[in-house]
Amino acid sequence: MTNDLFMRLATVHKPDCVAIAEGPAPEPVADPATLAVTLGSDALARYAGDCQPIYENLRRVIGQISGLMILARLTGRIEVADLPELATCQARWNDADERTAALAAPQAAQPHREQLAAACLFSGLALKTFSALGQRADNNAAFDRMVGLTKRAYAHLSAASTEKAGLNMVDFTHACCSCRH
């Protein structure tokens, strides 16, 4: 496979595209007063607001891991670990991990927080698996591990989805490779 083809496959978005910018893209969220009415309490509204950037980062991390894993497996090239997209993904995961560690949840939201924490844990483990890809090694075991960890992360994040709080898994705004942000 030529280097040009590899780079074309690796470059899903332009380097200045907000879809791969540091941190989550700004999106309108309900103000705390509206969330308090919708969710039934000020504490849950604050919690939902605090969850928004974590959820968005984890959703994107899981998608980026999946895309980079497909790229690496399809091309048989492990240089994916050196792509700026992986560094962006890692930075997004770091932010989600820090925010999750600091996330205070009301008693009623503890199960939700546990799902977010599990999604963060498994996506972080999947990210670390990229460093296990070897130049001459059979990478099937590493890819299988990555797939399993990514599926677990997705399952936990899906369990943490709640439409009332604006935490939805499906968002096609960054799905195409020719977005014009």
Image (spheres, grey):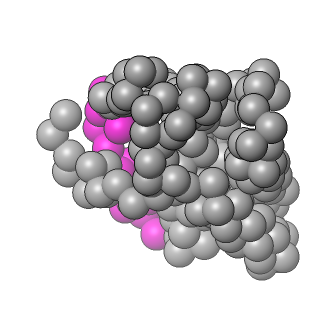
Residue at the spot 84% in from the left edge and 76% down from the top edge:
141
Q: Nearer the viewer, residue 123 or 68?
A: 123
Q: Nearer the viewer, residue 164 or 70?
A: 164
Q: Which residues are magenta?
A: 1-20
Q: Position of residue 84 (x, y in %)?
A: 53, 35
Position of 122 relative to 71 (above/below): above
Image coords of residue 134 (percent x, y): 81, 60
Question: Count of labels shown?
Answer: 0
| Residue 8 visible in rendering | no
**Quadrant of the rendering where the C terminus is positioned:** top left
Asked if residue 159 is positioned above or below residue 24 in the image, the reply reads below
Residue 6 belongs to magenta span: yes
Image vertical order of residue 31 relative to residue 153, above or below: above
Q: Could you tell me which residue is drawn at 53 percent across and 37 percent down?
A: 40
Asked whether residue 37 is in view, the answer is: yes
Left or right of residue 130, residue 91 in this image: left
Residue 62: give x, y in percent of width and height: 59, 54
Residue 167 among those drawn in magenta: no
Q: Residue furthest left?
A: 180
Residue shown at 80% from the left, 38% from the top: 107
